[in-house]
Image (cartoon, rainbow, N blue to C red):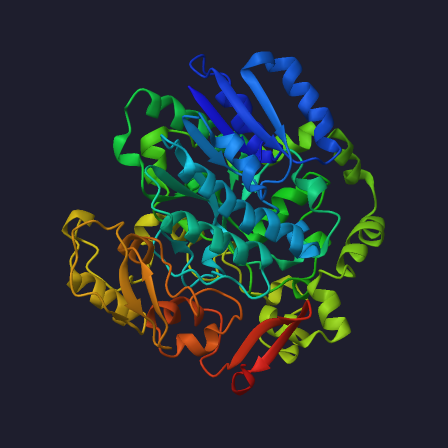
Amino acid sequence: MKIAMTGASGNMGREALAQTLELPEVELVRVLLTCKKKNDRLAKQLKKRYKERIEILRGSVADRELCKRLAEGMDYVLHMAAVIPPASDASPSAAEECNLRGAVAIVDAVKSCSPQPKYIHISTVALYGNRNEKHPFGRVGDPLLVSPFDHYAMQKLYGERYCLEAELDCWVVLRQTAMLHPNMMHDNISDGLMFHTAPNAPLEWVSSRDSGYLIKRIFERDMKGEVPAFWKKIYNIGAGKKGMETGYDTFNDGFAIIGGSAEKFFKPNWLATRNFHGMWFADGAELEELFGYQRDDVHEYWKEIGAHHKLYRLGKYVPKGLIDLFLFRRLRNHPNSPYRWIKNGDEARVKATFGSMEAAKSLPTRWEDCKLIARGDFGDYDEMRSVENAVLCDHGYDESKPQTEWSLTDFRTAAAFRGGALLSDSYDGDPYHKLSWKCRDGHTFSSSPYTVLRGGHWCPVCGQPTPWDFDRQSKCNPFYAQIWYDSHEKDEDVVYDFDGGKAVARPLEERS
């Protein structure tokens, strides 16, 4: 068996590569590494350890010819490469090169091969956008409401849709949830990104180790022909209930390593109240039942991170004031911090993150004045994390039907629920063959029923994020409204966009 991988230098990628090469049936893994200096050492280490079982290509994943070389002659292509926040916020162009143009290049490379390798596309939970206590659980097929100004999610949305619509012979899309890895603390103390996490954001943490094990199990079971029904579907990669937390819990787990907690180190008005991403997966058991990969517990893994980085233990002996002075005060004033946006009068980002400057400035400064999921202020916390109690989104069609029984009626009702219409008057029974649709704005487009009904995608013009005008769309799109209005007011009429790289928020009537 021969496998090609992108993103093998990342946290998930390193685990996926190492665990895949534990399989004796794997003859060769061909990896694509960027030409960054840090990958020079990695390349040498990999060749020394795996010798002829690994082949290394160097360059950009957006290089179409290089991607063809990567995919040619392979049995599988696994695309994990991504520029994630905060790097994607700091360098949108580099993020676009990898997350969007790279995805297009690798999909086209797979399609050009004869025979085509099986393709595994790693997507992200960020496509679903902001969630809170009103709909903490979600699943494949939910609306994709990328949060305003989220470069990473915006680009991943385009890349995923390109994969779904490419009509590849054999593919799967895996939407990765929040991921814990050994360098978690280190990677989050150089930027204001941590303050984007709302205290009540539902987060389902999976470890990089379990993510790598999932990839190994996919190859292992598919090679034996044990999972034929796995392919040509979208799944959420989760961890189950033992990975379900909120933003508040996550800060407590992380700061416990250095002798602190959310309430010891933070004030609640430093944190965003919306415009984040994350949710608990109501359908996370689907992958688990196929591959049995969910092993790590979020609390135990945080302790493992602390044990791995012994230096963090010294934080327990450092006065709180010094930690605040040399760490959190610096991060609060970082250009990517909501605290800095408020201080500098960045109306667009403050509007997206809090609703208004007034709302941001009136947030409570004491934790006892906050309503928290983790404290049971919205009901029993343990019961809230039980999928049996989940309040799920309506997808606008009869979901009790298996895919094999989908009909034009299902497509028409789904389109109407999105404020649009189905234009096609015939269906050949293949959910991956494209039909013609129209959105409420009058844009006509071709898309497969699977992409729309099971993918949660809609119009590629107004249904994609830029500019973000979900305030307007939700007024006539019940599919969007059921989630958007969980954290937005119905009288909000703002269009979020970039103007020369600067975030702007315009009144709806100024939408160009």
Front residue of this view, candidates 103 and 173: 103
How many numbered discs sit on the rendered protein? 0
Snapshot quadrant of residue 13: top right
Res 442 visible: yes
Percent x, y of residue 173:
40, 43
Percent x, y of residue 461:
44, 68
Residue at x-position 45% and y-position 32%: 77
Q: Is residue 307 left or right of residue 438?
A: right
Where does the C terminus fall, quadrant-wise?
A: bottom right
Residue 87's place in the image compared with 119, above or below, is: below
Snapshot quadrant of residue 316: top right
Residue 8's place in the image compared with 419, above or below, is: above
Residue 429's place in the image compared with 187, above or below, is: below
Residue at x-position 54% and y-position 25%: 30
Percent x, y of residue 328:
77, 54
Q: Is residue 267 left or right of residue 29?
A: right
Res 204 visible: no
Snapshot quadrant of residue 370: bottom right
Front residue of this view, candidates 415 and 266: 415
Percent x, y of residue 342:
72, 72
Where does the N terminus fall, quadrant-wise?
A: top left
Residue at x-position 61% and y-position 43%: 253
Identity of the residue furthest to the bottom in this view: 509
Residue at x-position 83% and y-position 52%: 321
